[in-house]
């Protein structure tokens, strides 16, 4: 499943956005359903996320890795998670673009799901995922505004 | 007294079901009963690196956890029961739990047993399985490619079997004036009975007997197969099929799950219950169809058909199911000519392993697919030569006087009169007027279409000799015992058991008519291997034609014996005795009478029996028919397509079926209605879909579109009766006619509606999106 989403952080300089979105305390506060988020080595985090996608609810444990970092314009997020309803394996490219309005964050993700997660509501899944990502970006936006 | 056979009697079984007094598997409660859950693979193809059950074992109420490794050597693989010969069939062993490798989403990995239904599921999720994923083989054509991942390492190109039947002289195809070439995909569909599968095991350590209640269409086949899998004598294994909420082929299969429940009950010495969840059903229960058909129909411009050549590429899933291999070979390949006199035919079938749930028989099993391709190809042929599709059908019908007729693949059609139901259906629809209306509506921009399906179906399984020759690992004769109690009440024991068909009613009618008894005096016992000596189950529309005949013959034997006793008491020669409406009388001697009940008492008391006659009044029949039976008919669908949205509405549906003698028109109509709903479901809505990772995308009724009652117009039904010479009832089979006939009828109707756009074919199911796209593309041209 491919997910594309972009969000414009109005009047937020790219460097500020980068700092915000890289701050693990911020991430802990802003990641939807985040129960724990611990850095186990550089740019590798162990996390526990409570996810509710339509009829599928569950706690997912897994790890999040940031790779191919090119401050302040690009990084890749590799997420693997495991929960009762199935497994998640996501590879997301995050691109930060400077524009006149502010900074545009583009998220291009390839998400693989297994088990019940895959077999329930695939057709609405990408829509729901966009909503979740949107919520996350909105929270980041609030955090970033405090730094400007 | 009115005739009972042929009467529209309400079903005997309904009052208990509609008042909540049915007794289904999940109603069974036994003292000390434990609950089972099966952890299933979330991956289509993966190695099992490790299974950690430590946490799960500590969970409250957990009694035991078994993995595939724990059961190695203790429980055998579950075999297929249809080993079609001459096709290099390669059966991969299916162990009840995967040992080191999972091969489809839903493959069993661990069995958990706990006190309580919630406890067992909570504990199941605490099992930590580490997988190393492998590339999956998905889609039959792709999985045959040289570079495709192998489902089973020792099975080359994933080919489970390669079957061929029939030869066509090359010049027949080469010199044909018209050649229609079309591929059809008969998509994978889920049988979706309203009750999912279930199994309850109870072991008696004293007697060593294991009782297994399970949702089975064929409890004796379950007993036969599971006694081998579990290593228990057939004499110590009792299989009971209680009330069942449908099967449609999905409950023919002997699955790993029932074996696991039986094993655990014996191992733990406590009853164990497993009820399949609906999500689980979508991944762990056999699917139907999933066949790619490449069809070539050859003939002349005048409409004479010369030959049909078909290649069927069948997705069998990860393992061969109980009847899977027979579906796309014998059932499909020998029926490719349909009801037409096509001199030559050939069929080549590839069975292909993939990393998906196995496929098995589903209502019609092979015949709906065969009917689909010939009925669609006939329409394409008619269009090509500019002939009315009805005229082309009539021109090529096997004629009434040609029966029994041997088709190009060697099957002997028992009886038929294909014109009769077609004429009746056209009259019911008022065909000529319809074509005029259609012209008018087209002018108004409305897309109305009409579609035909004139089908013939192979059913009433069947002659056991043939079953042996085609590799079926069983007989297909049937068994009935008619036991008359001292009061004259009757218990009938039947080897075929119902799961919605209404055997108690129809079999009861056969007995009631013969014995002159009220229906209430007759009870039917079925579905218990301890009560019924043997039987081969309910599938292939065989219950009335084979089982009903056994009931009929056993009843005749009862009458024969009763006559001897009556003759003895009335001091008349047996030849002079007449038995009518429950009374034995002497020809030409008024007043000399005995009722059936009086003779029942005499037979059971045995105070005064004729010399040499044994007491009791009971007879058994083991009926093995000499041939299959071939019901036929004509179905006509009228649809309207909304060109703005692609939405299809079924406006009218006329079904005229000829199934030989109809014992109860009411239950027969019910069968037709249900079959049509499922057949139209295939055409318009249903479809199981896997993505390229082998993940099932349609695992709920939100994602898998099962039709609802409101999707259908009132179905107009009628019967013509052309009796079968194969059995004394003259009956054929009705369970599968609806699914066989309706799918192509609907497709042909939609294609007729879309004729102004020049659209020839759209892959099923005809979702609004697909139809809309086809219309848009043709408009863009």
Image (cartoon, coloured by chain):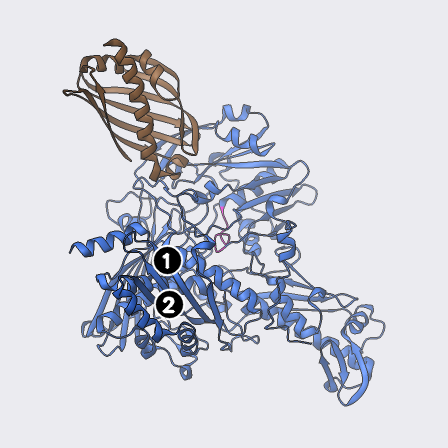
Image quarter where the N terminus of chain B lies is bottom right
Seen from this angle, which residue lies furthest front?
B444
Label 2 sits on residue: B334
Q: In the image, what residue occupies the spot 85% across and 72% down?
A: B607
Residue B83 visible from this viewpoint: no
At which x and y percent is residue B756?
23, 63
Q: Chain letter of disc 1? A: B
- Please name the predominant secondary structure of the magenta segment in the image: loop
Q: Is residue B172 above or below residue B14?
A: below
Residue interval drawn in magenta: B248-255
At which x and y percent is residue B209?
65, 46
In this view, the mark in front (2 or 1): 1
Q: Chain letter of disc 2? A: B
At which x and y percent is residue A56?
42, 32
Q: Is residue B535 above or below residue B276?
A: below
Q: Residues within 10 Å of mark 2 (few under 14, many from 20)?
A: many
Q: Is residue B151 left or right of residue B11?
A: left
Judging depth in this view, the residue of B19 and B156 nearest the camera is B19
Label 1 sits on residue: B649
| Element at label 2 | loop
The verdict on residue B638 being magenta is: no
Q: Chain B appears in which tint?
A: blue
């Amino acid at each position: 499943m491919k997910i594309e989403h972009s969000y414009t952080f109005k009047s937020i300089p790219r460097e500020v956005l980068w700092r915000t979105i890289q701050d693990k305390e911020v991430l802990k506060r802003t990641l939807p359903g985040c129960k724990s988020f611990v850095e186990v080595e550089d740019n590798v985090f162990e996390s526990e996320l409570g996810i509710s996608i339509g009829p599928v609810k569950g706690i997912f444990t897994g790890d999040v890795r940031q790779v191919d970092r090119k401050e302040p314009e690009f990084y890749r997020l590799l997420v693997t998670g495991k929960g009762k309803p199935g497994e998640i394996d996501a590879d997301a490219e995050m691109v930060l673009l400077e524009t006149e309005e502010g900074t545009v964050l583009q998220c291009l993700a390839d998400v693989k799901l297994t088990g019940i997660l895959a077999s329930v509501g695939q057709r609405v899944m990408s829509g729901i995922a966009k909503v979740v990502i949107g919520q996350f970006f909105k929270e980041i936006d609030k955090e970033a505004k405090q730094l400007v | 007294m009115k005739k009972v056979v042929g009467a529209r009697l309400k079903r005997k079984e309904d009052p208990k079901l509609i008042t909540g007094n049915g007794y289904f598997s999940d109603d069974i409660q036994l003292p000390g009963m434990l609950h089972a859950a099966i952890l299933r693979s979330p991956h289509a193809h993966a190695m099992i690196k490790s299974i950690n059950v430590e946490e799960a074992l500590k969970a409250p109420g957990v009694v035991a956890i078994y993995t595939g490794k724990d059961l190695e050597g203790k429980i055998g693989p579950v075999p297929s029961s249809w080993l079609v010969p001459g096709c290099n069939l390669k059966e991969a062993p299916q162990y009840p739990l995967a040992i080191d490798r999972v091969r489809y989403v839903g493959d069993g990995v661990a069995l958990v047993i706990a006190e309580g239904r919630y406890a067992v599921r909570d504990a199941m999720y605490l099992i930590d399985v580490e997988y190393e994923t492998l590339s999956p083989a998905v889609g039959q054509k792709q999985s045959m490619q040289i570079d495709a991942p192998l489902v089973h390492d020792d099975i080359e190109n994933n080919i489970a079997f390669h079957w061929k039947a029939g030869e066509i002289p090359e010049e027949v195809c080469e010199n044909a004036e018209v050649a229609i070439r079309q591929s059809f995909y008969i998509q994978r569909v889920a049988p979706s009975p309203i009750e999912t599968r279930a199994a309850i095991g109870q072991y008696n350590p004293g007697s060593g007997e294991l009782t297994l209640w399970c949702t089975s269409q064929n409890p004796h086949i379950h007993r036969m197969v599971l006694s081998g899998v579990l290593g228990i004598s057939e004499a110590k294994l009792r299989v009971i099929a209680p009330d069942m909420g449908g099967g449609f082929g999905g409950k023919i299969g002997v699955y790993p799950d029932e074996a696991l429940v039986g094993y655990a009950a014996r191992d733990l010495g406590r009853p164990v219950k497993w009820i399949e969840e609906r999500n689980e059903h979508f991944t762990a229960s056999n699917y139907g169809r999933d066949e790619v058909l490449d069809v070539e129909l050859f003939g002349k411009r005048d409409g004479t058909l010369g030959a049909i050549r078909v290649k069927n590429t069948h997705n069998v899933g990860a393992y061969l199911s109980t009847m899977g291999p027979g579906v796309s070979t014998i059932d499909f390949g020998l029926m490719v000519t349909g009801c037409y006199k096509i001199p030559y035919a050939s069929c080549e079938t590839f069975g292909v392993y993939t990393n998906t749930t196995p496929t098995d028989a589903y209502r019609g099993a092979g015949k709906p697919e065969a009917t689909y391709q010939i009925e669609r190809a006939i329409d394409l042929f008619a269009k090509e030569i500019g002939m009315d599709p009805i005229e082309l059908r009539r021109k090529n019908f096997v004629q009434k006087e040609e029966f029994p007729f041997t088709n190009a693949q060697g099957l002997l059609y028992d009886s038929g009169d294909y014109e009769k139901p077609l004429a009746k259906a056209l009259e019911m629809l008022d065909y000529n007027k319809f074509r005029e209306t259609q012209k008018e509506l087209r002018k108004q921009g409305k897309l109305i279409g009409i579609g035909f399906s004139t089908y013939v179906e192979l059913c009433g399984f069947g002659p056991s000799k043939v079953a042996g020759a085609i590799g079926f690992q069983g007989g297909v004769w049937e068994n009935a015992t008619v036991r008359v109690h001292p009061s004259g009440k009757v218990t009938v024991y039947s080897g075929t058991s119902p799961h919605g068909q209404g055997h108690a009613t129809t079999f009861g009618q056969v007995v009631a008519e013969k014995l002159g008894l009220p229906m209430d005096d007759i009870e039917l016992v079925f579905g218990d291997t301890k009560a019924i000596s043997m039987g081969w189950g309910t599938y292939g529309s065989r219950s009335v034609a084979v089982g009903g005949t056994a009931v009929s013959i056993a009843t005749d034997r009862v009458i024969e014996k009763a006559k001897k006793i009556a003759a003895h008491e009335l001091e008349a020669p047996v030849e002079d005795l007449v038995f009518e409406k429950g009374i034995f009388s002497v020809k030409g001697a008024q007043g000399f009478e005995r009722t059936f009940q009086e003779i029942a008492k005499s037979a059971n008391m045995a105070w005064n029996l004729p010399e040499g006659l044994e007491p009791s009044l009971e007879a058994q029949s083991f009926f093995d028919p000499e041939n299959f039976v071939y019901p036929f008919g004509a179905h006509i669908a009228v649809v309207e397509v909304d060109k703005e949205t692609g939405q299809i509405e079924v406006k009218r549906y006329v079904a005229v079926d000829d199934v030989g003698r109809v014992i109860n028109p009411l239950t027969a109509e019910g069968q037709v209605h249900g079959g049509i709903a499922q057949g139209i479901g295939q055409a318009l809505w249903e479809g199981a879909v896997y993505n390229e990772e082998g993940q099932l995308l349609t695992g709920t009724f939100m994602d898998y579109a099962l039709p609802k009652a409101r999707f259908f117009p009132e179905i107009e039904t009628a019967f013509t009766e052309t009796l079968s010479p194969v059995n004394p009832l003259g009956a054929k089979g009705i369970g599968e006619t609806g699914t066989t006939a309706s799918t192509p009828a609907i497709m042909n109707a939609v294609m007729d509606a879309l004729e102004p756009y020049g659209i020839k074919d759209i892959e099923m199911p005809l979702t609004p999106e697909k139809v809309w796209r086809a219309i848009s593309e043709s408009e863009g041209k």
